[in-house]
Image: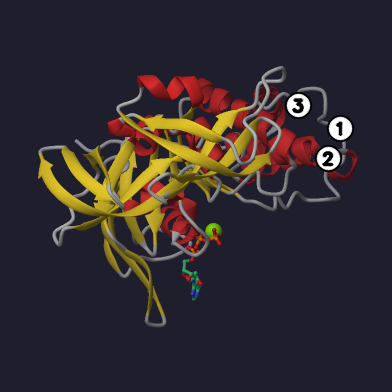
Amino acid sequence: MRQGVEFVGVSKVFGGHVAVNGINFHIPEGSFFSLLGPSGCGKSTTLRMLAGFEDPDQGEIWIGDQRADGVPAYRRPTNMVFQRWALFPHMTVHENVAFGPSVRGARGGELNRQVAEALELVGLGAYGARKPRQLSGGQMQRVALARALVNKPKVLLLDEPLGALDLKLRMQMQIELKRLQESVGATFVYVTHDQSEALTMSDNIAIMSEGSIHQIGSPHEVYDAPKTRFVATFLGNANALPVDVESVAGDTATVSLKGLRFAASVGATPTNGKGDIVLRYEAIRIGAAAAAMDVRTKARIREVVFSGSAIDYVLETEQGIELTAQQPHIADEKPHERGALVDIGWQARAARLFPQK
Ligand SMILES: Nc1ncnc2c1ncn2[C@@H]1O[C@H](COP(=O)(O)OP(=O)(O)OP(=O)(O)O)[C@@H](O)[C@H]1O
Ligand SMILES: [Mg+2]
């Protein structure tokens, strides 16, 4: 028997433009799933097809053991929370949340109980009498959440719901959303182009580009073991170095670049002897720590860029390879200086080989 949410070969075309291109995925019931990708890659279209606001041109959508495509939005066990929360401004918080259940016939004590429970869930138990204009942005977004949760949807759909909030509040809401998802046990499908949001909250992430899903996995899987060059460079900050591939054996390769020969892990095998090594900034060690690394060389520090919690070093190795390394900034540790010649190194498995773009 089917459970959770399933997309089978789903496509959507808008006037000749393929917005979603035959995607397949399964979301286990009661898990937190994110669709992550750059603007225009088809995330909202995917979510809107799940909600019933768009019809797929091809494929099947399943919610639990029910075929969902073709079923009107209001008859699906889904609720959507939008980026712009659109509360009714003339109604109180309580009335905003009560609107959905009252349309479906809830009345009196039962209605009040449902509303109170939903407001309690989002930490706004004491705010029922306020009007939206008397709330902060974060509180309004929580009312919007309560308004969706009060309907007890099996699947809650969230389209960049924190996009309008400032960074601090967004980080706080990320933690609250995850807690909320665990306590209500519903399946959450979350759309974002913000990788830190997806990495923080999700059980699984689907990484999308140009209408296709490149990889689905836990935050650690997609970050540590990207399967495509796109995933490897989209997540985090990474160097992409064009290399000659000398040999590939299983999941390790030997590559060379400007005379530096080194071992790397294989993300996807190039077929023409040319590849790109993707190496994250934070994987490169500088100074004494480099001695314990698999791949070692010397480099000149060309630039030092301070960004608060971290320092980026733009390096040029003695072979003439340009690299950027990132180190955490520790208050009483003196950063390396521009112009200095330093030892650098990285672990072989941190360098991942892909076919060239
Ligand atoms: N109703 C529509 N009519 C025509 N084209 C559309 C329509 N909706 C979306 N598109 C196009 O489909 C593609 C995918 O759009 P979608 O809104 O799914 O992207 P997205 O990943 O949500 O992007 P963003 O992060 O900017 O919200 C885009 O090229 C978009 O212009
Ligand atoms: Mg969108």
Residue type, mark 3 in image = Leu
Label 2 to label 1: alpha-carbon separation: 6 Å
Question: Does the residue at mark 3 contact the one at mark 2 (Cβ under 8 Å)?
Answer: no
Q: Residue at x 45, y 20 (%)?
A: 289
**Cα distance between the residues tagged 3 and 2:** 12 Å
Task: In the rendered view, tell whether residue 157 sits above or below residue 346.
Answer: below
Q: Residues within 10 Å of mark 3 (few under 14, many from 20)?
A: some
> In the rendered image, which residue does mark 2 sit on?
92
Q: Amino acid at mark 2?
A: Thr
3 or 2: mark nearer the eye: 3
Q: Position of residue 236 (x, y in %)?
A: 49, 42
Answer yes or no: is residue 31 visible.
no
The residue where tag 1 is placed is 129
Q: Which one is in front, 5 or 260? A: 260
Left or right: 187 as drawn, with respect to 147: left
Q: Are marks 2 and 1 in contact (CB under 8 Å)?
A: yes
Q: Earlier in the sequence, mark 2 or mark 1?
A: 2
Q: Quadrant of residue 34?
A: top left
Secondary structure at badge 3 equals: loop
Q: In the displayed orientation, state which residue is furthest to the right.
A: 134
The numbered disc on residue 124 is 3
Is residue 234 shown above or below 166?
below
**Residue 127's quadrant in the figure?**
top right
Q: Is residue 163 visible?
A: yes
